[in-house]
Amino acid sequence: MIEPPAGIAPDAPSPVDAVNALEQLGSIPVKGRAPKTGYTRDEFGPAWADVDRNGCDTRNDILARDLTDETYKPGTNDCVVATGRLADKYTGTIITFTRGQDTSSDVQIDHIVPLSDAWQKGAQQLNADQRKEFANDPLNLMAADGPTNGAKGDKDAATWLPPNNAFRCEYVARQTAVKAKYSLWVTKAEHDAIAGLLGSCR
């Protein structure tokens, strides 16, 4: 792993990345939030589809990507993650993951841009395949502390930011990249919150 330059938090974008994210933000339309009418999770396809056809569903792909020291459920061709450790970016803590009825939810897979938020900011205009891609795009997914992810819900950057300050720059830069990729928009309050954060990352 390349060490970040002095004075830059390990999870923060470099100054160049922050500038690029600000430029990208400038290309995203600013509009009001559309009604939530018609939104259901099903509008984004089946939960955790195997969109890359590697034999593993998206949840396990992201767990395998984001956890360390992971072990796999026997007989699943190293697909279903059984245990591991998560350096949780939202809280800055280490979480031990154990697959099970009462423990799996300790680590959840967060949509960095929530599906409901996306629906109200342009995803209604995407076709079914594009929405399925959005819901399973690794750029928009991250393993996270379950309770913190639950507290986030479908809030945007104007109303929720990670408790871990060191991750906030990367978080809004990722949101910006996702919204640009899928031609979504931001509200004025959201735009200003993201711009203010990225301005402080330089």
Image: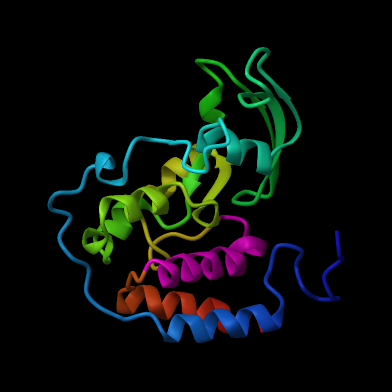
Answer whether residue 202 is magenta in the image: no
Q: Which quadrant would the C terminus be assigned to in this image?
A: bottom right
Query: Which of 107 and 179 lies nearest the eye of the viewer?
Result: 179
Residue at image location 68% in from the left, 68% down from the top: 12
Q: Is residue 174 magenta?
A: yes
As displayed, is residue 70 above or below residue 5? Answer: above
Residue 61: name its quadrant. Answer: top right
Q: Is residue 76 above or below residue 47?
A: above
Q: Is residue 83 left or right of residue 124?
A: right
Taking the view exactly as shown, the residue that stands out farthest to the front is: 53
Give the residue displayed 27% in from the left and 50% down from the top. 128
Picture coordinates of residue 155, whole percent (x, y): 36, 56
Q: How many marks?
A: 0
Quarter of the rendering occupied by the N terminus:
bottom right
Please name the residue shown 32% across and 51% down the image: 129
**How far from the left and from the top, in percent, is residue 140?**
49, 55
Task: Give the x, y percent position of residue 100.
Answer: 56, 16
Q: Position of residue 19 (x, y in %)?
A: 61, 85
Quarter holding residue 124 = bottom left
In-image side of 175 versus 116 (left or right): right
Q: Is residue 27 above or below residue 125?
A: below
The secondary structure that most of the magenta stretch takes on is helix
Residue numbers of the magenta segment: 163-182
Q: Residue at x 59, y 41 (%)?
A: 62
